């Protein structure tokens, strides 16, 4: 399988339908540790929203565009709000 080298435009409407957005994508990343690959960060309003999007019919209809043409590892990570984090540090 080839590494994913460009974004799949078909995924963008599925994200919009679930109030999510592509926060960052690096299709030419330089691996300094671990396996090489593409990094895409998608932001959702909540973990529950991500779990609603992933099995959605509109995303499932195009999932093969990713899984059949690239080596994909999908993960859900809990992020943080930078503004709130900095505010909490300032209040110490």
Image (cartoon, grey):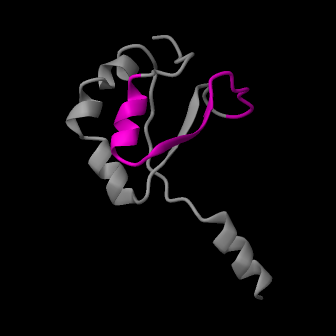
Instruction: Give the percent coordinates (x, y) of residue 32.
Output: 75, 32
Question: Is the residue 44 above or below the residue 1 in the image?
Answer: below
Which of these two is toward me, 51 or 13? 13
Query: Looking at the image, which residue is at 31% across and 51% down?
Result: 51
**So how many labels did they put on this image?**
0
Q: Residue furthest bottom?
A: 92
Indicate whether residue 18 is drawn in magenta: yes
Instruction: Give the percent coordinates (x, y) of residue 33.
Output: 70, 34
> Left or right: where does residue 73 sit relative to residue 85?
left
Query: Looking at the image, which residue is at 34% across and 46% down?
Result: 18
Quadrant the N terminus occupies = top left
Question: Is the residue 48 above or below the residue 56 in the image?
Answer: below
> Left or right: where does residue 49 sit relative to residue 37?
left
Instruction: Give the percent coordinates (x, y) of residue 55.
Output: 24, 40
Question: Is the residue 90 above or below the residue 26 in the image?
Answer: below
Instruction: Give the percent coordinates (x, y) of residue 69.
Output: 41, 13
Residue stretch in magenta: 10-33
> Left or right: where does residue 89 sit relative to residue 49?
right
Query: Looking at the image, which residue is at 31% across and 41% down?
Result: 54
Indicate whether residue 26 is drawn in magenta: yes
Quadrant the C terminus occupies = bottom right
> Left or right: where does residue 30 sit relative to residue 7?
right
Query: Based on the displayed image, in which of its 4 quarters is residue 70 positioned?
Result: top left
Query: Based on the displayed image, in which of its 4 quarters is residue 62 positioned?
Result: top left
């Amino acid at each position: 399988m080839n590494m994913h080298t460009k974004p799949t435009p078909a995924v963008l409407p599925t994200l919009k339908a679930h109030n999510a957005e592509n926060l960052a994508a690096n299709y030419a990343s330089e691996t300094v540790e671990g396996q090489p690959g593409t990094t895409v960060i998608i932001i959702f309003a909540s973990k529950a929203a991500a779990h609603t999007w992933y099995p959605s019919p509109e995303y499932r209809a195009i999932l093969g565009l990713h899984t059949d043409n690239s080596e994909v590892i999908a993960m859900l990570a809990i992020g943080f709000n930078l503004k709130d984090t900095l505010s909490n540090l300032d209040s110490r």
